[in-house]
Amino acid sequence: VRRVSSSGLSRDYDVLVGRGLLAGAGAEIERRLGGRQAVVCCDENVAPLYLEEVRRSLTDAGYSVSHVVIPAGEAQKDLARAEEMYGVFYDRGVRRTDVVVALGGGVVGDLVGFVAATYQRGVRFVQLPTTLLAQVDAGIGGKVAVDFRSGKNYVGTFYQPRLVVCDLDTLVTLPKAELHGGSAEVAKYALLAGGDLWSWADALAGGGLTAAGIADHLVAACVSYKLAVVAADEREETGRRALLNLGHTIGHAIEAATSFRRFSHGEAVALGLHAALWLSQRLCGLSAVEEQAGHDLLDGLGLPRRLDGLTAEQVVSLTGRDKKAGDDGVGYVLLEAVGAPRAGVRVPHALELEVVEWLLAR
Ligand SMILES: NC(=O)c1ccc[n+]([C@@H]2O[C@H](COP(=O)([O-])OP(=O)(O)OC[C@H]3O[C@@H](n4cnc5c(N)ncnc54)[C@H](O)[C@@H]3O)[C@@H](O)[C@H]2O)c1
Ligand SMILES: [Zn+2]
């Protein structure tokens, strides 16, 4: 098991990465947090797969254990579901020193984290992420939220978990499409960090993307990169955290232009990363060789490489709406080299159109 510890956050915590970790999660939680009662929250897809194992491990560690199962899907991430959970916690007499465990993907993590952050102004919260996306991204970093009206993650706060346990064995049951979605974020970290992370991501792509091929050192390196960025900007105030948006400006615009139906988030981000590579070579001095290596990495992971059925104008008209864009226009994260990102790059409108035309013509 690899242990990545945050440092410099409002409250530091460990992220454990390895295989077969769920069985020992209860003991790891008890050792760090204590408490009397544990409530495990998961969705209906994850419940039949991993709930019993997590319940048993918590019971063995001495907790009085109960659980909540919600339907699966992004639509659950709303205030109505949050209110229902407050009710469950209330009825069970959950106290601040008890432990709330989010077992599942980013939807459960964001929702349960939000509820844990706000119930009695914060109860102890643990993430057991079971999707690749949640293990490398959503489950760490402390952003918790629900969606509100048409705004994704519109109501939320920053609330760090006390412990995160990434059991890579859970990825074996993950639908292929979800594995792909997470791999786009892995590619993002590889481009941002370079070095070992790049080589390991490249090896994963070379072997064809499989759950068994996802190495613990690769996931741990993604976690470590994200924790370092988050520590430099925990509450998204200094702009450092914006680095994590590499590929997301065009990616979010593609998601919005296709009404969040045609592409998963990861697929849209992959297209956004292709676009960022193209722009980086033209605006930031990324070498043509590294640009191509980036395109090859994304292709090797089996991610989408071209766009169709849209116009460039449709996509570009949505790039500025991303709430992370700076006030002075669209600030992109681009690369001077693999491992050398630069945030806040202004991209002229004409070039935005050109890069989307390129995605449409590939
Ligand atoms: N907080 C953050 O910093 C952050 C960052 C990125 C994304 N997010 C959020 O994360 C969410 C997306 O997360 P996600 O991609 O994990 O989606 P998800 O939670 O919906 O999980 C994807 C699907 O996989 C199923 N599943 C989960 N684990 C499984 C397993 N081991 N085996 C089989 N099926 C499994 C789920 O039931 C679901 O149907 C979005 O709401 C997004 O806003 C948050
Ligand atoms: Zn993303």
Image: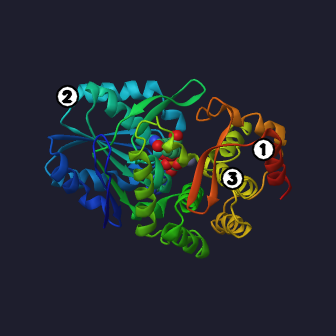
Mark 1 residue element? helix
Q: Residue at x 67, y 46 (%)?
A: 251
Circle 1 residue: 352
Name which residue type carries label 3: Ala
Given residues 270 and 210, the one toward you in this image is 270
- The quarter of the rendered structure image containing the C terminus is bottom right
Whether pointer 3 and pointer 2 mark residues with C-beta atoms closer than 8 Å, the reply is: no
Of the pair 239 and 126, the residue shown nearer to us:
239
Q: Name the quadrant containing residue 92.
A: top left
- Sequence-earlier tag: 3 or 2: 2
Number of numbered markers:
3
Secondary structure at numbered mark 2 = loop
Earlier residue among tags 2 and 1:
2
Q: Amino acid at mark 1?
A: Glu
The image position of residue 104, as x and y in percent, is 41, 48
- Circle 2 is placed at which residue position? 93
Return the residue at label 3.
276
271 horizontally vs 209: left or right:
right
- Name the spot of residue 186 as percent of width and height, x first: 54, 59
Residue 352 placed where, x, y %? 78, 44
Q: Is any part of residue 261 visible from this angle?
A: no
Name the residue rendered at 74%, 56% in the picture. 278
- Categorize mark 2 by other alpha carbons within 10 Å: few (<14), some (14-19), many (20+): few
The answer to whether the residue bearing label 1 lies less than 8 angstroms from the nearest atom of ligand 2 is no
Coordinates of residue 237 in the picture (x, y in percent):
46, 34
